[in-house]
Amino acid sequence: MSNLKGTQYTREKILAASLRLFSDKGYLGATTKEIAKEAEIAEVTLFRHFHSKEILFADVINTYSFLPALKSLLPEISNMPYEQALAAIARKFLKTLTMRKDIIRIMLSEMHRYPEQIRQIYNALIEELLRTLASYFEKFQKKGIARDFNPEFAARAFLGIFFSYFITMELKNLKGFKNEDTETVIKEFVSLFINGILP
């Protein structure tokens, strides 16, 4: 294994171990010593790759968040009809949220206790995610497919619809909410987003 590949392999091991422990114990509960042990490396090796726990956490949420998934998906759906493309984005978003539901649950519960640097990292990630989706909406506006609207507000509304659904179904598990077929939910919400409720 070359030195470069070895470095990348170690980095990936650290990120994967960090995801597991942050998902189990949260950012505040997981220590770098525990993460190093989980990754089967020395703690000093961890700090050679990530100079602080904050930097490590930032890399974890950037690596495993929806942002890289969205960036890789957009070129694939560039020629799809608007409604079909939005359904693909929603499907990928819900899948990513479901895969990361443990860390999302913990982040939501302990976010108010995070140091300012971590909140800034999280906010920057959300802003980049919204800008990425907003730029996608802008392309449809330029093509004349979509009417004039604020693309960032649209990005917030679209992701908010599906995040709210995810929170209700996956995290809260509230009684009285039936388990609708996800594809049906995606189809209905996308249709409402595109067409509104007026005839």
Image: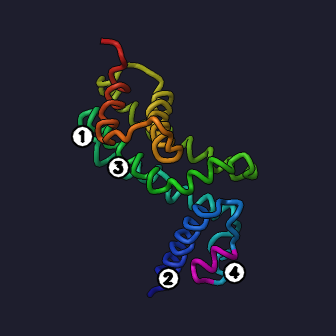
Q: Which residue is mark 2?
A: 6
**Residue 166 appears in the rendering:** yes
Gap between marks 3 and 4, in whole Å? Answer: 37 Å
Gap between marks 2 and 1, in whole Å? Answer: 39 Å
Q: Is residue 37 above or below residue 184?
A: below
**Number of residues whose C-alpha sits closer than 10 Å to that of mark 1, classed few (under 14), some (14–19) or many (20 or more):** few
Dots 2, 4 in contact, CB < 8 A: no
Mark 2 residue element: helix
Dots 3, 1 in contact, CB < 8 A: no
Q: Amino acid at mark 4?
A: Val
Q: Which residue is mark 1?
A: 79
Mark 4 residue element: helix
Which badge, 3 or 4, comes first in the chain's sequence? 4
**Residue 131 appears in the rendering:** no
Residue nearest the viewer, comparing 124 with 38: 38
Percent position (x, y) of residue 170? Answer: 47, 47
Which badge, 2 or 4, comes first in the chain's sequence? 2
Any mark on residue 44, and which?
A: 4
Q: Amino acid at mark 3?
A: Leu
Q: Which residue is mark 3?
A: 73
Magenta span: chief secondary structure = helix
Q: Quadrant of residue 80?
A: top left
* Span of residues in magenta: 33-41
Q: Amino acid at mark 1?
A: Asn
Q: Residue at x 65, y 60 (%)?
A: 26
Q: Is residue 194 above or below residue 119?
A: above
**Number of residues whose C-alpha sits closer than 10 Å to that of mark 2, classed few (under 14), some (14–19) or many (20 or more):** few
Mark 3 residue element: helix
Task: Find out whether residue 38 is within the magenta segment.
Answer: yes
**Number of residues whose C-alpha sits closer than 10 Å to that of mark 4, classed few (under 14), some (14–19) or many (20 or more):** few
Give the quarter of the figure containing the N terminus.
bottom left
